[in-house]
Image (cartoon, rainbow, N blue to C red):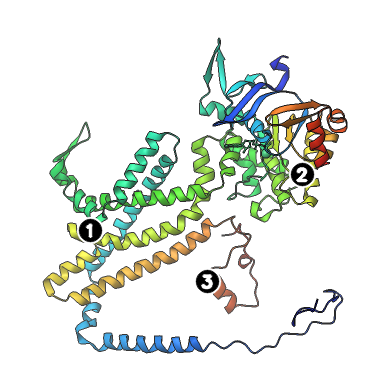
């Protein structure tokens, strides 16, 4: 498998917190333009794996590449050199991340939330960033909420602002960590629709979700994780409709 | 199951029921409030009468000195000593708080040591210490230039150092509590967007920490205004010492202490009002709607028929 053709490539990724081994050898490939849904019981290491992809967490063993480049390190010969903070930050700026609890900046309006990183991380001129921010907020259906603070928006609206905030950085990869789990049921649909449109536009996405309908419809690949390893992966039809492993079957019977 | 008295009748639907009966109840009486009020009024009367009629208060002397140039000069020194010491305290506090939260144990330890040292000794001792520092370091050497400590450490400089460096230790704890009050997810989202640690602190965390930092900082400023009177022991002519200098000549201690107290009260009152508006400003985005200021409420009561757009404030206005 060549690292160059994959947007994300994980080889035997290990991660522990102290003595607790959370990831115990994860192998995964996400092709450019693919949508991969990560499912599995709580505590199986899904969030941790997602956070390793943009180096919010350091891995202890294995290799992880994003767009052909090693995550968090530079390899010279057979030596690894840790990247400096500014270099790590620059790479993170190319990866969008959407959190379960939105994490919008509470002291900023929707528009300011979306303008913040393009101006202060990428150094884009303010007028240009504002125009672009309005465009992405329009795209997620919030063109009329530019000057609302997060506390004045519903959960679904906040999550769509968060998606817009990530999109405004023109990421080459988007990570979603249970983007609809904190939402009231009637608000889930709007957020999933935005994600569906995003997938159709060709965005590469890794999505941790319990929305099996979304996974079945949108995912190119469904990955079932349990106990820090990938138990089973394949097309939605295979993994969701005809799981091979007993653990997958047990999990699906609970969530479907 | 028998419904308890006063519970709604079973099967009554809220929408289709009979028209609701208005509540006309006899309000609860509060005899205790009237008794307390009577006692307070009686006590106030006794105190005020004694202050007004006892000639030894010498209110005319208070009137003579209230706007005298020596007292006003002292007030000005008090005000800028407070301002400079607080600016130093706040900047130092932010630096120490960020250091305290650093993953580097040397950096965090250094900050911890500073806080321990300056909070663990009386500020009066620290003031005296800076005042006498020239005994320890007769010359202060900045490499290219060196100074006679005696000429550099004037009472004003000693007071600024003593109060400012001490305040830094207290502000550090306030700022640290503010930083810790901001949800971890905020920093995480900022990191994920490619912001550096410093950018995240400056643009995301500190502005939101302000809501927690501002109220106690207001209290610190008010308290600093009063603590600055300690500088009188190192012969800095701030407000209290200005009064002391005058009464050491004319022996009118009580009237001059009253004069000084009036100015302290005026200054702390002005600061309290300022603090109220600052808290409003930094509460932005935290609540769905902001409460009206007393001024806005007054305007509404006086002009009730006009609802001005600026009166209906959402979190965005200010
Ligand atoms: N910062 C941390 N420190 C210690 N343990 C952690 C930390 N983050 C996650 N864990 C542990 O790692 C395991 C996997 O967590 P997580 O990746 O959040 O699982 P999932 O997202 O699949 O529910 C859990 O047992 C969790 O308690
Ligand atoms: Mg999780």
Q: Quadrant of the C terminus of chain B?
A: bottom right
Q: Nearer the viewer, mark 2 or mark 3?
A: 2
- Decide if residue A197 is in sight here: no
| Residue name at image x 51 percent, y 38 percent | B199
Using the rendered view, name the quadrant where residue B65 is placed: bottom left
Question: How far separated are the C-alphas under marks 1 and 3?
Answer: 37 Å
Residue furthest to the top in view is A77
The residue carrying mark 2 is A191
Image-quarter location of ligand 2? top right
The residue carrying mark 3 is B295
Q: Nearer the viewer, mark 1 or mark 3?
A: 1
Residue A166 at what x, y percent from top left? 67, 37
Classify mark 1: helix, strand or loop: helix
Q: Which of these two is toward me, B153 or A12?
A: A12
Chain for disc number 1: B
CB atoms of marks 2 and 1 within 8 Å: no
Asked if residue A181 lies left or right of residue A109, the reply is right
Mark 2: C-beta under 8 Å from nearest atom of ligand 2? no
| Residue name at image x 80 percent, y 41 percent | A254
First in sequence: mark 1 vs mark 3? 1
Residue furthest to the front in view is B1
């Amino acid at each position: 498998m060549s690292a160059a053709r994959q947007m994300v490539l994980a080889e035997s990724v290990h991660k522990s917190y102290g003595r607790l081994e959370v990831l115990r050898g994860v192998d995964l490939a996400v092709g450019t333009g693919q949508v991969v849904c990560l499912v599995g019981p709580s505590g199986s290491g899904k969030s941790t794996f997602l956070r390793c992809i943009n180096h919010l967490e350091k891995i202890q063993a294995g290799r992880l590449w994003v767009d052909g480049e090693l995550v968090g390190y530079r390899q010279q010969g057979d030596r690894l050199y840790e990247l400096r903070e500014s270099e790590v930050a620059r790479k993170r700026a190319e990866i969008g991340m959407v959190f379960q609890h939105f994490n919008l900046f509470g002291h900023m309006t929707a528009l300011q939330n979306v303008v913040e990183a393009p101006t202060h991380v990428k150094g884009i001129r303010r007028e240009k960033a504002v125009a672009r921010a309005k465009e992405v907020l329009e795209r997620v259906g919030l063109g009329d909420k530019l000057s609302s603070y997060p506390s004045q928006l519903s959960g679904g609206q906040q999550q769509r602002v968060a998606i817009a905030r990530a999109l405004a950085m023109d990421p080459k990869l988007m990570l979603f960590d249970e983007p609809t789990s904190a939402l009231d049921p009637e608000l889930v649909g709007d957020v999933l629709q935005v994600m569906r449109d995003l997938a159709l536009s060709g965005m590469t996405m890794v999505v941790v979700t319990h929305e099996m309908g979304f996974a079945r419809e949108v995912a190119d690949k469904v990955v079932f994780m349990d106990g820090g390893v990938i138990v089973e992966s394949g097309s939605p039809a295979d993994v969701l409709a005809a799981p091979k492993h007993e653990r997958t079957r047990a999990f699906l019977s609970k969530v479907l | 199951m028998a419904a308890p008295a006063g519970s709604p009748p079973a099967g009554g639907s809220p929408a289709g029921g009979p028209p609701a009966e208005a509540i006309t109840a006899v309000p609860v009486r509060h005899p205790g409030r009237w008794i307390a009020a009577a006692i307070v009024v009686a006590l106030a009367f006794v105190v005020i009468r004694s202050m007004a009629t006892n000639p030894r208060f010498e209110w005319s002397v208070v009137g003579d000195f209230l706007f005298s140039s020596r007292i006003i000069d002292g007030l000005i020194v008090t005000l800028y000593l407070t301002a400079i010491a607080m600016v130093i305290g706040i900047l130092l506090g932010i630096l120490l708080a960020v250091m305290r939260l650093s993953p580097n144990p040397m950096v965090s330890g250094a900050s911890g040591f500073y806080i321990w040292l300056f909070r663990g000794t009386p500020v009066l001792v620290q003031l005296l210490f800076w005042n006498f520092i020239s005994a320890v370091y007769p010359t202060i050497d900045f490499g290219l230039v060196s100074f006679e400590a005696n000429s550099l450490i004037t009472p004003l400089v000693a007071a600024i150092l003593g109060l400012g460096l001490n305040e830094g230790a207290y502000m550090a704890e306030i700022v640290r509590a503010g930083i810790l009050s901001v949800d971890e997810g905020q920093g995480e989202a900022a990191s994920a967007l490619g912001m550096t640690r410093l950018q995240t602190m400056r643009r995301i965390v500190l502005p939101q920490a302000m809501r927690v930092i501002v109220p106690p900082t207001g209290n610190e400023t008010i308290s600093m205004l009063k603590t600055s009177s300690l500088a009188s022991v190192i012969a800095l002519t701030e407000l209290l010492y200005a009064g002391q200098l005058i009464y050491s000549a004319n022996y009118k201690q009580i009237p001059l202490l009253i004069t000084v107290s009036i100015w302290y009260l005026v200054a702390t009152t002005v600061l309290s009002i300022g603090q109220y508006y600052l808290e409003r400003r930094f509460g932005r985005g935290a609540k769905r709607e902001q409460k009206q200021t007393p001024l806005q409420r007054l305007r509404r009561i006086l002009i009730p028929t006009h609802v001005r757009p600026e009166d209906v404030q959402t979190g965005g206005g200010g």
